[in-house]
Amino acid sequence: MSVTDPQTSSGQLPGTQTSAAKAARWLAAWRMRGASGDARLLPENQLTGPMPWVIAIMIALTVVAAASGLALRNMAYTASADLEGGVTVQIVSAAPAERKRQALAALTALHAAPEVASASPVAQDELNALVEPWLGTRPGDDLEALPIPALIDVRLDTRLSGGATPARLAALRARIARVAPAARIDAQAGWLAPVFRAINALQWLASGLITLLALATMAAVLLASRNALSNHRETIEVVHMLGGTDRQIARVFQRSMAFDAAAGGLAGLVLGVITIAALGRQFAPLGSGMVGSAVLGWSDWIVIALIPLLGVGLAVLTARLTVLAALRRML
Amino acid sequence: MSHPESEIVRFDNVGLRYGTDKEVLTDVSFTLFPGSFYFLTGASGAGKTSLLRLLYLSQRPSRGLIRMFGTDAITLPRGRLPGFRRRIGVVFQDFRLVSHLSAFDNVALPLRVAGVSETDITKPVKDMLEWVGLGDRMGARPATLSGGEQQRVAIARAVIARPDMLVADEPTGNVDPEMALKLLRLFESLNRLGTTVVVATHDAHLIRNVPESLIMRLDRGRLSDPTGALRYPPRRSAPAARLDMTDQ
């Protein structure tokens, strides 16, 4: 219940209000919708203007950091799954005939090995294409004459005992060495270990950024709440003297903070999603190999959509604890 | 002797000092009974406002014992203070109206704090504002009200919840004599309903208008009680502590 206040519309004739004034009145009315008597204890804008913008920036940065972390995780997961059972066998021999013979022998031995799911030689054309950027293809060049190792792409059966573990590689090495002494066997995942370590570090970085942003949000809310408490100390004392409880007063601040955080969170989410989309467009042309697997799934989007809600919860909780702690110091 | 079962407030050797300054109240002892009417007088700086702050639980004493509504107010946990404060109506000397609220919402504040539903608030608040002559100023913010109007809003706010005790600090200082008497009649009406009223005032004329009242006079932080009637009042008898007010 509220009695019409002639002061709120004074100074202007009916029908001459500016759009900004109308918007402000509508916003104030919206904020007070469903408000209990408690909500009238303090002005509805006691947490002052910049708070929604601060929260919007924090949420936008958190959304981008979280999306990056999730995309990196997906990329690492996909690459890891692809390479988990991958083994490369190189037949390093300068003599083409001997190289071919050992490659065939190794292939036969691999097909006979129970832990090998598949083994296929890499075609000479593919090998030529791989070295072409470095060696060129002038007329008369004979790449066949070059001592390029013969390659066999092997997939181990990961259902039996995991991926290309050192023990399995050692067993495979022993089996092939008997028929192809020039063979070198390497796990494909081993080549990308530094990349995985870098991805892991970036994921930790994203997590660290999210934690710092959450702490910064809490600090901003704490300062805003203390400032609001200071500005309205006299009113709070009066409400206390009239029998108002700390929880009643804290509820007012929580409510106001919830509105500010919700508005800021929504704006931050929109800003963050736009940024993610823009980054996605930039990376799309690279869309092959590992980069192409750095995409967000529907579960990732749910996590991103939850960020503003978590932000609102964090802001409200911080405001409540700050206000209650400050009120406890008053009689 | 006092009668603990019926007393509403009891002060025993209460002292109050702010920080390390000398005591502003020294060895203050008195008993207030339900339905009694008290005037608190004394020169400026005598400690009237400090004593009232103790009465409306805005301040804890430095020493002594205070019992309110049958409970030790010194050791009262902070969480129980709101319940006690809701039984006390306060008229502050500087009104302390909430600036962003209308006169109506200011008067409704104690009811809202107490959790009264909005439908049960409207009529009593309107009636109260009509009664203090502000029926046409319900929507006005305090800044647009005169000093007298603000004082009437403050009084309406203090009495709207029918408190067990009303504490008023110079409640008629900014109103004309006619309105002062009208407000005094309001206090008396409340008093007749059983509310204990404590009014701090310099206005001897006001005091003379309530012949059955008791006088509490503070002099440099000490309560003047030559007959001991304030400390050990007779059981609901005739006024016992009327003091000479000629210097007020």
Image: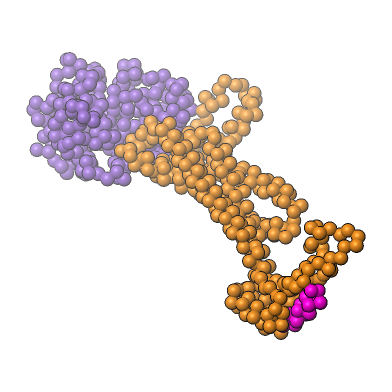
Above-or-below relation of A54 to B220:
below
Of residue B70 and residue A266, the one placed in the foreground of this image is A266
Magenta segment boundaries in residue numbering: A95-110
Give the x, y percent position of residue B178. Answer: 33, 17
Residue B196, picture quadrant: top left
Colour scheme employed for the rendering of this structure? by chain
Give the x, y percent position of residue B60. Answer: 24, 36
Mostly what secondary structure, the magenta segment? helix
Above-or-below relation of A286 to B225:
below
- Residue A29 is left or right of residue A78, and the answer is left
Q: Residue furthest right?
A: A139
Give the x, y percent position of residue A66. Answer: 59, 52
Residue A49, picture quadrant: top right
Q: Is B132 covered by the magenta stretch?
A: no
- Residue B208 is left or right of residue A228, and the answer is left
Residue in the image at 25% along x and 26% along y = B49
Question: Which chain corresponds to the colour purple?
Answer: B
Question: Can residue A316 be seen at all in this image of the molecule?
Answer: no
Of residue A121 and residue A277, the one placed in the foreground of this image is A121
Of residue A47 and residue B55, the one placed in the foreground of this image is A47
Question: Can residue A43 be seen at all in this image of the molecule?
Answer: yes
The picture's colour for chain A is orange
